[in-house]
Amino acid sequence: MSANHLTLNLVEGSVSFSFSPGAARELKAAIDELMQKLKVVATKNASGGGRANPQSSMEYRYTGEVFLELFCNPNIWPTPFAAKVLLTVRSDTIRLTTEAELTRVIEDINQYLEQAD
């Protein structure tokens, strides 16, 4: 695959598409923020201390050669390691919507950025 293609590994299979390093850094920042929210929820759940303040969902959108959207509600996952994101990749001719493991998406983005830099 070309250096400007991001490959996201799914539970079954993978999807690869044209993606810029700048967009990958924006996505990484959005996921870093999501991880902080997931940790707040997990800490509140682990301490057993009442209800945690609801955390806002992550909604990342990118429009380039394809449209990419990632969505995650941090309030429904017990730990960051259990979290999944709803992933949509679409173009004029195809649309893929599936769940992906958050930890796997993080690994894929980090690998892409290492190769791009």
Image (spheres, rainbow, N blue to C red):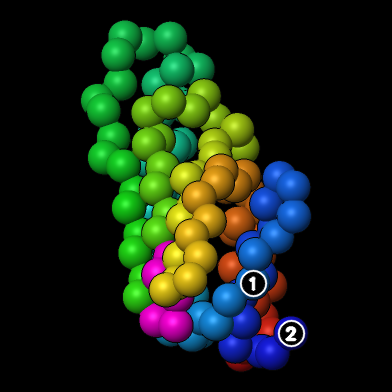
> Looking at the image, which residue is at 30% across and 14% down?
51
Residue 66: % across, % down: 45, 75
> Looking at the image, which residue is at 47% across and 45% down?
86
Residue 100: % across, % down: 59, 47
Q: Quadrant of residue 30?
A: bottom left
> Looking at the image, which residue is at 26% across and 28% down?
54
Q: Is residue 54 above or below residue 10?
A: above
Camera-nearest residue between 84 and 48: 84
The kind of residue tagged 1 is Ser
Q: Secondary structure at mark 1?
A: strand
Mark sitting earlier along the chain (2/1): 2
Q: Are marks 2 and 1 in contact (CB under 8 Å)?
A: yes
Residue range in magenta is: 64-68
Question: For this view, does 4 lie left or right of residue 31?
Answer: right
Q: Is residue 70 above or below residue 111?
A: above
Residue under label 2: 1
Q: Is residue 46 above or below residue 32?
A: above
The kind of residue tagged 2 is Met
Question: For this view, does 63 lie left or right of residue 47?
Answer: left
Which quadrant does the C terminus fall into?
Answer: bottom right
Residue under label 1: 16
Residue 19 visible in the shown view: yes
